Image (cartoon, coloured by chain):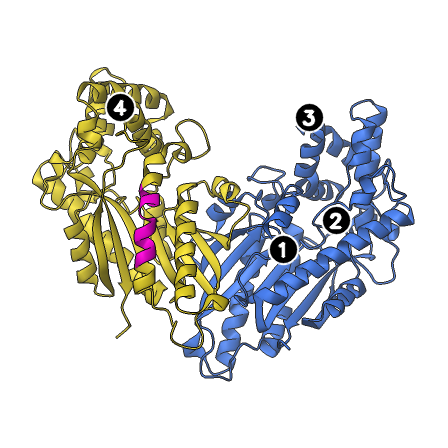
Chain colours: A yellow, B blue
Amino acid sequence: MEEEERGKLSLAYPMNSGDGPYSYANTSVSQRVVIDFTKELVQKEVAEKLDIGFSSTSPPKAFSIADLGCSVGPNTFSAVENIIEAVELKFESEGLASKIPEFQVFFNDHTSNDFNMLFKNIPPIRRYYAAGVPGSFYSRIFPEASLHFVHSSFSIHWLSQVPKEVIDKSSPAWNKGRVYYSNSPDEVIKAYKAQYEKDMEELLQARAQEVVCGGLMVFIILGIANGVNPFEAGGNRGFDLIGSCLMDMVKKGIVSEEKVDSFNIPTYLMTPQEFEAAVKRNGSFSAERIEVLPHVKVNGASLNAHQLTYCVRSTLGQLIKQEFGEEIVDELFDLYLKKLEEIDPSSIAEAEKTISFLAVLKRKPSQ
Amino acid sequence: MEEEERGKLSLAYPMNSGDGPYSYANTSVSQRVVIDFTKELVQKEVAEKLDIGFSSTSPPKAFSIADLGCSVGPNTFSAVENIIEAVELKFESEGLASKIPEFQVFFNDHTSNDFNMLFKNIPPIRRYYAAGVPGSFYSRIFPEASLHFVHSSFSIHWLSQVPKEVIDKSSPAWNKGRVYYSNSPDEVIKAYKAQYEKDMEELLQARAQEVVCGGLMVFIILGIANGVNPFEAGGNRGFDLIGSCLMDMVKKGIVSEEKVDSFNIPTYLMTPQEFEAAVKRNGSFSAERIEVLPHVKVNGASLNAHQLTYCVRSTLGQLIKQEFGEEIVDELFDLYLKKLEEIDPSSIAEAEKTISFLAVLKRKPSQ
């Protein structure tokens, strides 16, 4: 476990930390809107599907929740509150209002996440005991059968690492002059997809051991619609655009071409079908619900070019800083904003082919 | 719980973080020596006293350990390794070698502790799942009956706060011109002792709910010998000396007298008898062993004046910086070193009246 995890940690790409203007905490509004939207769906699923010994005489005394890829808040705190409310309602509806358990919440993210900031942000008035768990969720990070509920929002589109082939000059999948797969030759797309499948199997395998039978996992996933080609999806084009900006900076002599060739964004936008196939292959969970969520509007409007640039910067800024140095970050995102304004940002933000979807999985009884 | 905890957190006094020359991580060698020394004692106690369902058919699948006041390492990692080794030996001796559980370790300290540094320091090769738990151990921080083993080294001599009376000008316990109780009027000593007793009851009360019946708690405590007056103990004189240095700086006009009057070090060096009395009053734990440990020698010698100053600086530096500003810290500890050299540091470091003692408590069956 540990060797593997160490390898992955070196490839960790934390969200921008702190509370500055480009921080993840201040630019994750659209993700918050989605989490709030899913509240009712989660309540319904918990009411109907959660199955952790309610009929026996001893439901668990402590109920454990993990949020995978929690970043520094505040979204993780809303998600957790929604889950706790749903579980309390479930206990009440089972006639167990007097046996509502204590809650323990495990906030997980890479070791390089700013846990100091996360811990400062945890609401002082809360209904749970809080713990932070550093490490990649693509490996074991919890004891066997120790979790009742797993949640993860907008995290599992991050791969554990860039597929090796795409930075290997001798491979047909070498991704020269690009930083993402969606507008690349088939070999690159295949390498990304293979990495995604390997990661997802590791994620499900690890959780299968950690989640109790009858426990639930809720994922909110940034992906693309079934049947859509990667290059058609606006979200992917938004990532591709980073490569185009970097290549412009290569032409200006600000960034070395070799660096761009060796840099790739380690995310893969899966379709609901791809996700469901991974769940079936793994076999330990049943997919109880997979549902495409409506497109996000903040205060009734789509994200504008400025907001989109903020989002992408808070997500990728740290990674780009690590790879290219802090000095290029401002210029890169100025360029990014300009390009976005030229191509009408709503075509990227709202394009129906990029989606968020909710997936609810239930741990099957062990055979 | 939370309101109370928040109040306490504002009074948190983290060890110096980071890995600079004055960091706790680099100056806690003498504490490490003690932890290593206690390894065998802990093994013996675990072998004889740990009682968590070995005779039933189902010993726990996951074994939970908490280290209270863990700081940033490396001492906490040694302590945890020793405990895991002891528990594994216990399982083997019970004929349960095939049922050795997975271990989950909760590293606890104040929210202001440098958890980012702690998480980076966790050994990559290890036998446990790691979690960080922010919050004061004088309040509830874990779910009911969720811990099998609690450990705490050199932490519970820290009070949850400075007793209010000693900074109240209208109180007979006002501690004017001093920053510690040991050389102060009786009223001050009483106020410190009352705070200690209140804190210890809260600590034991919280743990009584969190530790399973038959579970163990091991404390390594910095204290003074039974029957000794506080002002006689070298450790206390070492803290008093900070007050004397600060008053010198008042005379030089570097520090305001009012600030010194309102500043007090929130530690209380208890005797083994005082600790045992607190355990009896609380009633939930049996004291299985209370044993004074031999005096620490690092490489065969007592700490010299430089090492002692480093120790005190790594412990109190952050607190003094918070109260008086960073600019006085260097001068204060230069002065401290000079005074220490004048009075023969071995009288402070080695004086037999300051002690470390080991206490092993076992959670009684609930009535």
Figure check: A142 above or below B113: below
Q: Residues within 10 Å of mark 4 (few under 14, many from 20)?
A: many
Q: Which mark is residue B200?
A: none
Residue type, mark 4 in image:
Ala
Dot 3: element: helix
Kindly identify which residue carries mark 4.
A305
**Mark 2 or mark 1: whose residue is earlier in sequence:** 1
Q: Quadrant of residue A352?
A: top left
Residue A175 position in % (x across, y down): 15, 35
> Label 3 belongs to which residue?
B327
Asked if residue A181 lies left or right of residue B360, the reply is left
Tell me whether circle 3 and circle 4 mark residues in contact (CB < 8 Å): no
Q: Which residues are magenta?
A: A34-44
How far apart marks 3 and 1 lie (CA) works out to 34 Å
Image position of B185 (left or right of A268) = right
Report the chain holding disc 2: B
Find out whether the residues at labels 4 and 1 contact each other: C-beta distance under 8 Å. Answer: no
Label 4 and label 1: CA atoms lie apart by: 47 Å
Helix or strand or loop: what does disc 2 sit on? loop
Q: What subunit carries mark 4? A: A
Circle 4 or circle 2, nearest the eye: 4
As drawn, the residue found furthest toward the top would be A252
A281 in relation to A196, above or below: below
Q: Nearer the viewer, mark 2 or mark 1?
A: 1
Compared with B5, A186 (above or below) is above
Residue A131: percent from left, percent from top: 49, 53
